[in-house]
Image (cartoon, helix red, strand yellow):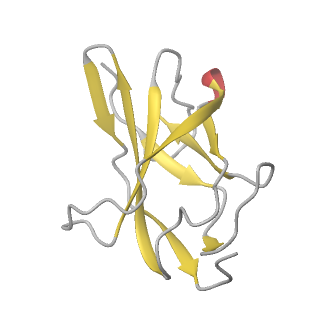
Amino acid sequence: MAYGAYLTLDQTKWAYGDFSDTNKLTGTIYTNKDRTSAFTLTGYTITIRLYKSNWENADYFNKAATIVSAGDGTWSYAVSTGEFPAAGRYLVKAELSKSGERMSTLNDVYIMVRGGPTA
């Protein structure tokens, strides 16, 4: 079992109505809190979850991400129209799963979902 998993997002903001097959939500998972060593994602599946706060259980996203480079700890998700929750600030967690092991990222990472067109 890995020591820990720490998430970074490449985006800090996303508009509610934005979607694209090529402009994806992306990030990296690391093994240490200083985010200097990539988490090897070989054999894992990644689920991206959005919460309004640390103490709320409602998951506003719950989408399976695609591993871009397992050795580099990178992932992406092509957001479809209407998938992002309403405007607001959301805590982002990545849940990593593989046979006999499941964990979520330990650090607090937030994304601001802005209002926007609903297409």
Quadrant containing the C terminus in the rendered view: bottom right
> Residue 17 versus residue 95: which sits nearer the camera?
17
- At a point 63% along the width and 36% down the height, the residue shown is 74
Give residue 80's position: percent from left, percent from top. 64, 56
Residue 52 is left or right of residue 48, and the answer is left
Give residue 37's position: percent from left, percent from top. 56, 32
Residue 83 is left or right of residue 81, and the answer is left
- At a point 29% along the width and 71% down the height, the residue shown is 53
In this rendering, does residue 110 appear at all? yes
> Residue 105 versus residue 98: which sits nearer the camera?
98
User: Up-down: is 28 above or below 98?
Assistant: below
Quadrant containing the N terminus in the rendered view: top left
Furthest residue toward right? 22
- At a point 57% along the width and 67% down the height, the residue shown is 82
> Residue 2 versus residue 86: which sits nearer the camera?
86
Image label count: 0
- At a point 66% along the width and 56% down the height, the residue shown is 10
Residue 95 is left or right of residue 80, and the answer is left
> Residue 91 versus residue 24: which sits nearer the camera?
24
Give residue 65's position: percent from left, percent from top. 55, 39
